Image: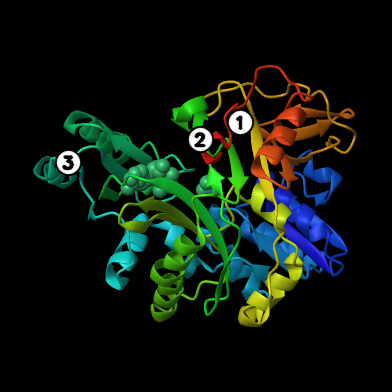
Amino acid sequence: MKILVVGSGGREHAIIRKLKESPKVDTIYAYPGNGGISADAICVEGGKATDIPGVVAFAKEHQIDRVVVAPDDPLVLGMVDALNEAGIRTFGPKANAAILEGSKVFSKNLMKKYGIPTAAYETFDNPKDAESYIQRQNQYPVVIKADGLALGKGVLIAQNYEDACQALKTIMEDKAFGASGNHVVVEEFLEGVEVSVLAFTDSKTVKPMVSSMDHKRAMDGDQGLNTGGMGTIAPNPHYTQQVAQQCMERIFLPTIAAMEKEGRPFKGCLYFGLMLTKKGPYVIEYNCRFGDPETQVVLPLLETDLEEIFEAIDGQRLDQLEICWKNQAAACVILASGGYPVSYQKGYPIHGLDEKGQLDGACIYHAGTKYADGQYLTNGGRVLGVTTTGDTLPQALQRAYDAVKKIDFTDMHYRKDIGAKAL
Ligand code: AMP
Ligand code: GLY
């Protein structure tokens, strides 16, 4: 089979490396991929992950058997719909299901309608009404979210009324996230432990993957700005069997049933961002895709052939497929450019990698790298994901940090406490 993976980050590299293990897969293309991915797949340089006509034309021309659409924006824009109309098989939800991530107003209203536990909220289309609601509620912190996609930055947590008004101004008037800020969700602040659960679903059956824990803040001790994610571990020790069962009954099955009922069957990877509160698990957010960098710790633990899972989802046969996981732990430490997530330099040589962009004793997933003149260069905010597995979490973490010591580039920044909260 020929497979095309759309996207260019560490998540896409992890998907490609897992697909390479499949005996069904002969050739993998990445659209556009990156420097490190070019060691594992044929990269379509200059391709844009949101270029729907470009991806459809490429898939036809190269007789691609399946296109895996990994990032949120092409999914929300309808890339899967366009590929299917052209007769090309895919992995990922259609636009009318990807809206679960594409509009927070939609997902909050869906949860309310179907009784799925989530923070109490109201939605607004003008800042004045939102301000008076916040003033009446008078409960802080309060969470303010831009409705649409915002590169993971559209959530602001305000400690008082003045901060809340400032946040509303940033989102709705200054349009810091563009049209995503035409509507906002104002919601209750939830306290508890966060867990990420990615799940395969064919819209009838839902099969959760190994749970994970992201580290969103830039600095140790959960300080600094929110990022796309600075590291992950799997499984998440807070996600016990009992919690898993509650999530299945109260959240996972009700969500896919609700989407089915609304005429929006979700087929693909559904990501549940959960808060384990004193009152049980609550949904913080849905994503319509694999998480980044959650995928980097989840897929290394997958034993079942990933393409076989994609086929079962296509045929709505997921209930008949047993999905097996290694009884191990995984850790991923993100090496970022100094200054990320605000501003940073690119183009620094990365020292310590072999010619394939790898390193003995770890799996290096490339996020923002470029390959030029025989060396790997930094080319983004998140540069590499240093990933290891072990029989225990401490062992996986020790291996990851041992590998990190062997890599270096100018102004390299990483968190030294990935997984510490889980030990
Ligand atoms: P999201 O983009 O919706 O995942 O939000 C980003 C981060 O903001 C989450 O990972 C949480 O840490 C935090 N967050 C979002 N909503 C809430 C909430 N209602 N209560 C507490 N924290 C939240
Ligand atoms: N790591 C969070 C996300 O993928 O949205």
Residue 350 appears at what percent x and percent y?
78, 25
The numbered disc on residue 139 is 3
From this viewpoint, which residue is outermost toward the top? 410
Q: Image quadrant for the C terminus?
A: top right
Quarter occupied by residue 110: bottom left
Q: Which residue is mark 1?
A: 381
Residue 169 appears at what percent x and percent y?
26, 35
Residue in the image at 34% along x and 66% along y: 116
Residue 189 appears at what percent x and percent y?
28, 44
From this viewpoint, which residue is outermost toward the left? 136
Residue in the image at 18% along x and 45% along y: 130
Q: Are marks 2 and 3 in contact (CB under 8 Å)?
A: no
User: Is there any visible trace of residue 8 in the rendered image?
Assistant: no
Q: Are marks 1 and 2 in contact (CB under 8 Å)?
A: yes
Q: Image quadrant for the N terminus?
A: bottom right
Q: Residues within 10 Å of mark 3 (few under 14, many from 20)?
A: few
Give, as a three-letter code, the residue at label 3: Gln
Q: Which residue is mark 2?
A: 227
Question: Which of label 3 and label 1 is nearer to you?
Answer: 3
Question: Which of label 1 and label 2 is nearer to you?
Answer: 2
Residue in the image at 51% along x and 29% along y: 218
> Which sits earlier in the primary sequence, circle 3 or circle 1?
3
